[in-house]
Image (cartoon, rainbow, N blue to C red):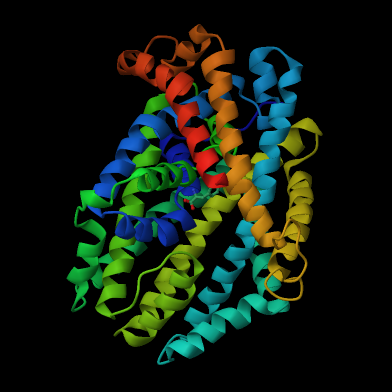
Amino acid sequence: MMREGFGSRTGAILALAGSAVGLGNLWRFPYLVGENGGAAFILLYIIFTLFICIPLFTAEFIVGRRSQSNTFVAYSKISGNSGWKWAGAFTVLIPTIVISYYSVIGGWSVAYFFKACSFGFTNVDQTVLNGLFSDLVSSTWTPIIGHTIFMAATALIVAMGIKKGIEIFSKIMMPLLFIMVLAIAAYSLFLPGASEGVEYLLRPDFSKINAESCIAALGQSFFSLSLGFGIIMTYASYVSKQESVIFQSLATSVSDSSFAIIAGLAIMPAVFAFGLEPGAGPGLVFQTLPYIFSQMPMGGIIAIIFFAALLIAALTSSISLCEVVVAVISEEMKMSRKKAVAIVFAIVWSLGILCSLSFGPLSDVKILGLTFFDLFDKISANILMPLGGLLVTIFVGWKMKKSDVYDEFTNSGTLDASKKIFGVCYFIVRYLAPLAIITIFITSLI
Ligand code: PHE
C-alpha cells in the first residue's frame, strides 16, 4: 500500500513547526531568557540551535526520509540489520509516555479556555485564582474530563490522516497561532510599565552566562525542537524526496525561535506592568496570567485569545506525539489508521488518568519517590529524550554509510548549498552533538 505523505512544502513545515511550538515556548522560554541574561541568553540559544540542534534535526530527518518508514523499522531498514529494531521500539516508547502527561496539561488548558470563554477571569483576586488552579488539579473529575476532551481532539485529527488531518489542521492553526500571539504582544507592549518587562527579557547581561545557563540554553533548544522523540523522523518520512533537508530544518527552527521570542514579548511586559514576579511553568500560565487578565482593560478578550493559543500550541504538539505511535501500530500490525488511533487513545487515556490523579486522590502513590506525573515527566525529559537523541547521532554519525547520509542530505548531490555545509553538519552529528547530549544527560542527573 502506498504511504500517505504531506501534500506541500508549507504543509510539512507548518506541521513540524506545530510540534516544535508548544508549552516550552510559552511557559519556559520567556522565563529562562529573563533569568539568564536576556539578549545574551538568546544569543547563546541561537548559537546552540544553529550549531548543535539544527544538525541534529537534519540527522533525525534523514533517518525518517531515507527509510520512508515509521520509527520502529526505520533504523533496521536503513542498516539492513533487524537488530536495530530495539532502537525503534525504544523510540516509540518515548512519545507514548510523554503524551500521557502532556495531555493532562492539555486538559487543564481546555478547562481554562472554557473558563475564559465564560469571562471567568474578570474581577477576581489573586487568592481566588490560586485556589482555582489548585482546586482544579487536585479534583478528580474536571481534569479527567479536560484530558479526555484534549485526547479526543488529538485522536480525531490524527485519525483523519496526514493530509486531511495533520496537514490541514497545522496549515490553519499555525498562522492563526502566530497572529494571536502577535496581537497579545502588540497589546501588552503598550501597557504602562511594559518597558520593564522588555528590559527583563532583552537587556543583554553577559555576566549571567555560565555553565548552567549554557546547559539551560542547549536543553531548551533540544526540547523545543522536539528532538529525540521520533517525531521528526516520523514527519520526515512523509516529506517528499524533492525537499531540501536543511531548508525544512531551518524553517522549522526559525518559526520555533521567533514564536518563543514573540511569546516572551506577549507575556513579560504584562507581568511587569502589573508589578508581578515572573516565573515559569504552570504557575505563570495558570495563576499569574489569569490575574493579569482579570485586572487589565479588555482582559476578558485577551484571556480567550491566550488560552485558545495555549490550546492550539499544545494540540499541534500532541498530534505529533500521537502520530509517531499511530504510524507504528497501523503499519506494523497492518490495521487501519482509525483502529490504530483507537488503540493509542485507549493506552494514553488510561495512563493519562494516572497522571491526572497524581495531584489529587493518587498523590500519595509514589514510585521512586515520585507521583506518576512527575515520574513520567522526569523519566522522559531526563533519560529517554537524551537517549533517543543520542541514538540518532550514533546511527547517522557512526552506523550509516557516509555516502548515504550525503545522498539524503544533498538530494543525490543536486543541492549546491547543502553540499557546501554537509561536512560541517556531519562533523557535528558525529562528534559535537553526542558530546552535548551526554553533557545535558549527566548534568540533569546530578
Ligand atoms: N516542542 C514542544 C515545546 O516546545 C515540546 C514537545 C516536545 C512537544 C516533544 C511534543 C513532543 O513545548
Query: Residue at point 60% right, 27% down?
Result: 391
Left/right placement of residue 434 relative to residue 107 reads: left
Residue 337 position within the rendered picture, expressed as x and y whole percent measured from the top left: 73, 42
Q: Nearer the viewer, residue 209 or 198?
A: 209
What is the quadrant of residue 370 in the picture? bottom right
Q: Is residue 77 left or right of residue 112?
A: right
Q: Is residue 229 visible?
A: yes
Quarter occupied by residue 299 = bottom left
Q: Residue furthest front?
A: 446
* Residue in view at x 49 percent, y 7 percent: 403
Write the residue at 41% across / 89% down: 122
Residue 319 x, y percent position in the rendering: 59, 50
Residue 90 or residue 378, whichever sits in front = 378
| Residue 348 position (above or below residue 221) | below
Picture coordinates of residue 76, whole percent (x, y):
69, 19
**In this orientation, does residue 242 appear?**
no
Q: Is residue 368 above or below residue 79?
A: below
Residue at left offset 35%, top offset 13%: 419
Can you give x and y, in whole percent of width and height, for residue 442 in the image? 54, 39
Q: Is residue 400 left or right of residue 290?
A: right
The answer to which of 275 and 73 lies nearer the viewer is: 275
- Quadrant where the N terminus sits is top right
